[in-house]
Image (cartoon, rainbow, N blue to C red):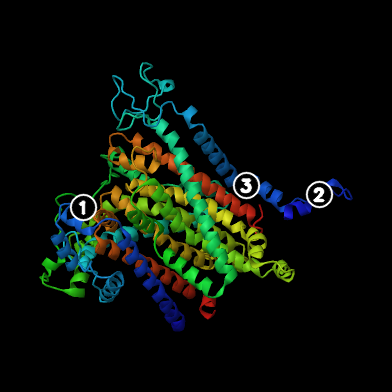
Amino acid sequence: MWRFLIRRLLLLLPVMLGILIVTFVLVRLIPGDPCKAMLGERATEEKCNAFRERFGLNDAIPIQFVRYFGSVLQGDFGTSIKNGRPVTDVLAERLPMTMELTFFATLFATAFGIALGVISAVRHNTGVDVGAMVFANIGVSMPVFWLGLMLAYIFALALKGTPFQLPPSGRLTAGTDLPSLLKVWGMEDAQGIQRFVVLLISNSVLLNSLIQGRLDVFADALRHLILPAAAVGTISLAIIARMTRGAMLDALTQDYVRVARAKGLAERAVILKHTFRNALVPIVTIIGLQVGGLLSGAVLTETVFSLPGVGTQIVDAIIARDYPVVQAFTVLIAIIFVVVNLIVDLSYAYLNPRIRVS
Amino acid sequence: MQESASAPFAAAPARPAEQLRVQSPFVRTVRRLLRNRSAQVGLAIITLLVLIALFADVIAPYACDQQIRQSGLRRRSPPCIHLLGCDRDKPQLLMGLDSNFRDLFSRVVYGSRLSLQIGFLTTGAAILIGTLLGAAAGYAGGWADNAIMRIMDVLLAFPSLLLAIAIVSVLGPGLINTLLAVAIVSIPVYARVVRASVLSVKEMDYIAASHALGASPLRILFVRILPNSLTPLIVVGTLGIATAILDAAGLSFLGLGAQPPTPEWGLMLGEERNSVFNAPHLVFFPGIAIMITVLGFNLLGDGLRDALDPRRKA
């Protein structure tokens, strides 16, 4: 197992380097002068030179890359050209929102997707099965941003006044105040990795409110997450349901299932212990593969629900030609994606020992 | 070609007709496809869409940028259908008016042209380039294979929509650039599929026979290997059209794709997203149009997979 893990980790290195190169080159190719974008069209040549000097934009591209690579290795993503703040601060501010959204979307998609798939397979060729699969087919075909808008309409307007009413936008109800943990813990002067971690936890409204014992804020934040998470998760839910159904149907025809039944095991045990466990490998694969789609979905959904996450930030940064921010966010998302894929590969090895050997 | 080779067998009159009808693989696949429920629905939807796109000028009551200004008509007017009891003095508006007094139905109808073009063009371009790269990698092997596939791995390391957003930001917003971006991000998928099937076909005896007969490598690749490794590509390509339409709509929704006043469904949704609470029809109909189109290609893709996979029994 350890050799497998180390080999997989080593294989990650060239991909990570590739991600850095692609992002760096792409960002440098963005047309337009960042100086003019930041200081205005009428910025003088002198001012622009000083600006470029300050951000190292006057050096040759390879030198810029080496410097960039060196600082990324030290966890330094530079400063935002737009507002002069360290990019790590911007990351720490925006990332938790997107992670919360992606986490709940994954949870929603996995729980309901697997349940729907298992029920479909067990009730194969009945009305339940057909209904579930029609739903799944429609589910994979819906644009997330449209689903988000429709959910907002239904739950914020059509169901207004009922217990099912949900907020259509924002992270918290206006006027809700949740102080930063930096302030609460008296760590406003903290620097480096310590500051980054505290900011990350602090900006995750769910974690922060729990730590501070503000259950009202926690519940409010959760209510604001339901619609976006459902919108982002529905496509994945449908894909997971289809995959689960297929894998379960395959597993149900195996001899060991017949043996389990012949032994007189309860149907419940046959389905859960013998069939489902063996159907898990393709299901885990497909869940892992969803993460890219969920992250992309999060970008679109944040726009619909006005959530302050990575997606809204990346679009803003592209418009403002804020190189360091675009670069950092793209690299980060690609790395998350790659790491999740690695975890999926490792979980195969865990679920199916034959893979470890080969 | 295997189809023509089987024709003489079909004509041989030696046995009773039932046992004789040896169908060519192509005919057999088409029959299996037409018997498949998903494929039937998918094909029906796509045919209908193609017809709508072709006859958009006839079907749409107004031009896609024509403003309908008339007393009693407000911007974002809800649908008015005479059959359902709408006042006959008012013009019939199947899907209502948008924020610029334009007939939404006409715009949705014209939008079908764009979406189908986007789907076919981007997927076609991506398949073409992906096939060449994948075939070159699989056939040549060695360092060429390594170099090509590592680049593809890096491209696959980005979630596709995010990479497309990054590419559009480099190229600048616009419909053509969106097409390019969506095509570029889907190349690696096709390259992988083609490489995998080239690798398996390359080891077949008939390829060795071609070598022995002195066929040039290019001839072997293009005439012997590629036609025989296309099956998975057809399935992935059909499903890819659906993804391409969704991604392009997403980019337009963010304002990075088609620009106003183009009747593009994603853009129409993006422009009217703030009207969702007071004029939901403006958001509802373009979204339904995207969903039905994507559904059509998804269903056809599923049907094709079932029909083309010899392990599955129809």
Q: Residue at x 42, y 22 (%)?
A: B84
Q: Chain of mark 2?
A: B
**Image location of residue B299, percent across then percent down:** 54, 47
**How far is the residue under mark 3 from the one under mark 1?**
49 Å
The secondary structure type at the circle numbered 3 is loop
Q: Amino acid at mark 3?
A: Asn
Q: Which mark is residue A172?
A: 1
Disc 1/disc 2 C-alpha distance (Å): 72 Å
Q: Does residue A179 sit above or below B248 in this rendering?
A: below
Same subunit under labels 2 and 3? Answer: yes
The image shows residue A135 at horizontal and vertical percentages of 47, 47
Q: Residue at x 62, y 57 (%)?
A: B231
Q: Is residue A178 left or right of residue B106?
A: left
Q: Residues within 10 Å of mark 1 (few under 14, many from 20)?
A: many
Q: Is residue A71 above or below residue B107?
A: below
Give the position of the N terminus of chain B as an image quadrant: bottom right
Q: How many marks?
A: 3
Q: Left or right of A283: which side holds B67?
A: left
Looking at the rendered image, the disc whose residue lies closer to the viewer, 2 or 3, is 2
Report crowding for label 2: few under 14, some 14 to 19, many 20 or more residues within 10 A (C-alpha).
Answer: some
Q: Write down the residue under mark 2.
A: B10
Report the residue marked by disc 3.
B36
Q: Nearer the viewer, residue A145 or B126?
A: B126
- Three-letter code for the amino acid on which mark 1 is drawn: Leu
Q: Give the spatial CA distance, label 2 vs label 3.
A: 25 Å
Crowding at dot 3, Cα within 10 Å, few <14 / some 14-19 / many 20+, comes out as: many
Compare residues B256 and A243 and report the one nearer the observer: B256
Instruction: Kindly identify which chain the residue marked by label 3 belongs to.
Output: B
* 1 vs 2, front mark: 2
Numbered mark located on residue A31 in the image: none
